Structure formats: C-alpha cells, structure tokens
Amino acid sequence: MPDIIQLLPDSVANQIAAGEVIQRPASVVKELMENAVDSGADEIKLIIKDAGKSLVQVIDNGCAMSTTDARMSFERHATSKIKKAEDLFAIHTLGFRGEALASIAAIARVELRTHRMEDETGTQIYIEGSNVINQDIYAGTEGTSIAVKNLFYNIPARRKFLKSNTTELRHIIEEFERIALVKPEIRFVFTNDDRQLFNLPKGNLKQRIVALFGNSYNTRLIPMEQASDVVSISGFIGKPEFSRKTRGEQYFFVNGRFIKHPYLNHAVDSAFRELIPTDAFPTYFIYFKIDPKEIDINIHPTKTEVNFQNNNVIYAMLSSTIKQALGKFNITPSLDFEMGAGPDISLPPQNKSFDTPAVKVNPHYNPFVQNGPGASNHPDQLPKKNRDNWQELYNIPEIAIKNDRTGLGTNNEIPDLEQKAEDRVEAVFQLLDRFLISRVRSGLMIIDRQRAMERILFEENLANLNEGRGFSQQSLFPETLHFSTAEAEILMSIMEDLNLLGFDVERFSDKAFVVKGVPAELNNMDSKDVLESIIDNVKKNLNEIKIDKKVFLARSMAANMAGRNKKKLEPEEIKSLIDRLFSTKFPEVAPDGKPIVKMITFEELEQKF
C-alpha cells in the first residue's frame, strides 16, 4: 500500500491558516490597524469600500519598512516582536505572531507601499494569493499604505458566507472603536464608501469617548483609578441613572489590548447591584495595566481572551474600585453628618395653658351585639338572611371570554374554548400579574399574558410590515435622540421598516435622529429605550436578519413592547387580550416557540391530592 501522508502546498497551508485569523473584513481591519499602531504612527486613516469586501486600506505615518522587511513581512511567522519563547510573556505590542499579512495575502490581492524617513525611495509590492506579482521602487510619502482588495477572491465559498454590508460594516466599526479607545493620542480618520464616518482628533481618553459615542457622554462618566502591586485600574464608568436596557458600551482593555472576560464583567455588575434595575446594564471603559508575565494572551487566535494568574484578586479590586468611585461622587447612599439647618421649631408662650387630651370611650360598646355600633361581620354573627349564602360576598366577577375562531389546531385539550360565549361564562383571575387562570370543561386553562401579548403584537407588526400600514401616534413635541455611529448605521438600515411599524423617525445629523411619532401600542414608553433594544437585538441576531429581516423586526418589537407592560389588567383588558389572542394564527405558542396556553385537567388536580 503506497504512503498516503504528504505535506500540504504552501498556498493551501496559508489558506487554512488564514481561516483562523481572517474571518471577515473586520479581521483585516483589526490586523492592519494594530500594525499601524505598533509602527509608532500618530495619524492613521482607514478607507473601506463595499463594507470591506472590495477594499480595506490603512495608511499611517509610522516608521515604515525597508525593502527586505517589506518582502519578509508576508512570510508566515515572520515577526519583529519575538525571538524566543520567553518573549511571549513580555508582550507590549498589539501584534506579535507574524501571521496577519501572510494570511491576508493568501486570500486577497494586496498592494503594499512603504517609505522610511531615512531612505530616498521606498518599496512597492503587489501580491495575489501569496504570489508576488510585482516589486518596484516607490517614491511617495513617508509611512506605510497597505490596500487589501477583493477579499476571498480565490475562495468563493468563504466569500459567499459573508453577511450583508450592514452587518460587515458594524463589525468593522466595532474593531475601529476598540483600537481608537486604546490610543487617544493618535488621530484616526475612517471613510466608508467616500463618506467620512469618524474624524477623531488627538486628545485624552474622555475626549476620545465623547468623540466616538456623542456629546451626551461628557456628563455621564465617572472617573475611576486604583493602583496596587498586582494591577493598576483606571478608566470611566457610567452613572447609574444612564444605565441601558441593553448591553451598550462595555469595554475591558489589558495593557492596551481589548479583551472579553465574563468573570470581570460579573465584578462590575456586582458593584452596581442595588443602584440600577436588574434588567439594566452599566456603561464602562476600564483599563488594566499588569505585568505581562501575569497574563497569557496567546490562548485565542484573535487575542481577545486572556488568562490571569490572580483572577480573584483582580475581581475584588475591580469591584472595590468601582464602589469607591461611585461613593466618591455621591452616587451610593451614605450618612451625611453635616446636615443643614433643621426644622424651625419655636417655643410656646410662657403663660399659655394646655388641656389634657381626652379619650372618649363608649361604655355600651359590645362587638358581639348584631345590631349595635360594633356589630360583627363574621358569618356566625350575620343576620340569618345573609348567613346561608355569605360566600356570594366573595365571588370573583365573571368575565365572558368570547372567541370567533373556528379551530385551534390539533391540540385536544383546548376545544372547550370553542364554545359560544353564553355557554361558558367562567371567572378569570390574575396570578402574579402574569398568568390568567380560567375554568374550562376539562380543567383549568392558564395563559401567560406576556407571551400572549407578544404573539398578538408579533402578528400585528408583521402584517403592518407586509402590507405597509403602520399606525403612528404623532408626538406633540418631537424628540431628538442621539446614538453612536455604529447604532446610527444600524438604525438607518432598518429605518424604512421601523416607519412601517408605526415609528416616524427622520435622520437629523450623522448621529442624531428626530422621533415625530411612535406606535400607538408603546403606551408612553421611552422611545429611546425601545429603539436601543431593537438595535441591540439587531447586533446579536444579524444572521436571522439576513434570513428574514421583517420577521425579526416584528418579533423584536413585540418582545420589547410586551415585556414592558406589567401592570395589573382590568376585566375589560383581560377580555380584550383573550379575544385578540385566539384570533391569531398560532395562539398556543409565542414567536420564540415557548407555550402560551397550558391546561391542567381535573385528573391531574386529583393526582396532586
């Protein structure tokens, strides 16, 4: 039998390696911008076209490369950052593995132009699929420009799985923001399809946060700082009153590198406990400085996950630092011993006399006398005409549950609901302001009112989107809302569908929108909270949007509106809710597949006893 194991060709090996590092255009942006930062540049420009599918170009004024270095930079594992294994535990740069340029060159057409200050001329290299097509002299400006064109041109299957331009642009903006937050001393310019999205001047960290996310953050942030032998912590946290219903701006950075760390996220949440609602999330921009020997950043290809040697110590210190910052700025409750002037209490006149308070007692009062002033309402003490049927005093008002549907599917436990209203008048009562319970022929019917409302609103929203007939309640005073650049781009991509749902929203500026009307079902809810929730759901479920954006938006809107109305329902509202539920197409299940109606038969009740 012949040998079957053989070495892969370099071109195939590079494409396989590229799959680990380059997953989408945002991955190219991350790697190129990290290299630009490491070059010592103080001005970096990012230019993209077609959401990075056609072009990703990064231009910097850094140290640039010699002719030899320019050619060597495209070889796998060629790096200037490490020379031995021990160097992995002393990393202070963003890039270090030497895989980025080699991986990018394997799956795209790359053009590199670089010119060092000390050289008369620079170098220009053109590469396609890891093959150097041309190398020439470059006499342009000092610094480095690298353009990546037609990403995945030689791997059509990978290119086919790229998401919509809105999705890919959002990922690019995320990577851009993470790097811009690390280096406020660098000027960044971001242009998308010849339209400038960001122009961030040099400044301090707070100025950079405000430039990225809007002027409103100028008054929302609280500084925090603490240092120890283990770790130094600094940055900003958002004031509790500006917490959001969705996860917004939450950033951790370790030694200038963005990371994700659920354990540390829990420390932040614990520090804000009792200051914000349980369904709200704080904003934070937190920076850690720690000895590189105490962390391992080489555990994930994208370097966004790290291991700490002293997780417990860092957790405790982070929570304590946040609480100290909140207390320092009088956010947390505290005892104030420097009270102002007390109430004005004047002394009575010296010659004034006072009468002793008198307590009047009825000596003839007898609680057991039926017709007296103290007659009891106990059943044994009631008049005979009320004693025999006293239970009727506690009867729950009966509500007619009307249903015009002709069938509910194949479930044999719910046919009782198909009776005429006059034949099945039963009491419906609420439990925990969530469940509606009613007696039917076979037992008890329990309805989850929140899921029922979600089903109702979902089908109504979907009908509005498909038929183009949203109902809007115009606002007396239009409201101007501000969003981050990434949120504004998402909002623009779904603007037309939002207007069909009943919103009347117009773009006022790059990050500002004017809300002139909202869906009538919002019932005075905060329109900004609802829009932020929808935008956050778009971020989390972009794959679903590509399948059917209208279905996703209808479901997201229904979930937001149904989850916010938790007041106790009046009898008329209960009747209307049940009528609307059983006139939908699928009253048994919510849009997410969870049950709305449950039956408990009399046999099941008997088994309980």
Image: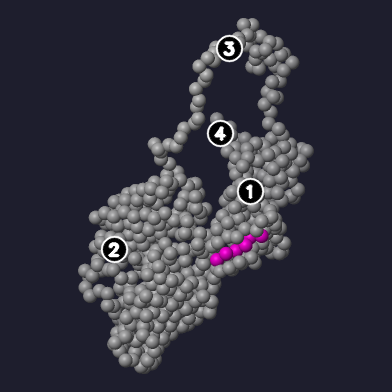
Comparing marks 1 and 4, which lies closer to the viewer?
Answer: 1
Viewer-nearest of discs 1 and 3: 3
Q: Amino acid at mark 2?
A: Asp
Q: Is residue 353 left or right of residue 179?
A: right
Q: Position of residue 106 (x, y in %)?
A: 39, 82
Q: Which residue was labeled with disc 2?
A: 296
Rendering quarter of residue 114: bottom left
Q: CA distance from mark 1 to mark 3?
A: 57 Å
Q: Earlier in the sequence, mark 1 or mark 3?
A: 3
- Badge 1: few (under 14), some or many (20 or more) residues near its Cα, within 10 Å? many
Vertically, is 417 above or below 247? Answer: above
Q: Amino acid at mark 1?
A: Ala
Residue at mark 1 to residue at mark 4: CA–CA distance: 29 Å
Residue 250: tell me if it is visible: yes
Q: Which residue is mark 4?
A: 607
Q: Is residue 555 visible?
A: no
Instruction: Calculate the distance from the C-alpha at mark 4 to the C-alpha at mark 3.
Output: 58 Å
Q: Nearer the viewer, residue 443 or 517?
A: 517
Q: Nearer the viewer, mark 1 or mark 2?
A: 2
In the rendered image, residue 270, in percent from the top left (x then y), is placed at 40, 47
Numbered tag placed on residue 452 in the rendering: 1
Q: Which residue is mark 3?
A: 359
Q: Main secondary structure of the magenta part?
A: strand
Q: Earlier in the sequence, mark 1 or mark 4?
A: 1
Indicate which label's residue lies in the foreground, 3 or 2.
3
Q: Earlier in the sequence, mark 4 or mark 3?
A: 3
Q: Amino acid at mark 3?
A: Val
Does 141 sit above or below residue 227? below
Q: Residue at x 50, y 63 (%)?
A: 214
Which corner quadrant holds the C terminus? top right
Give the amino acid at mark 4: Gln
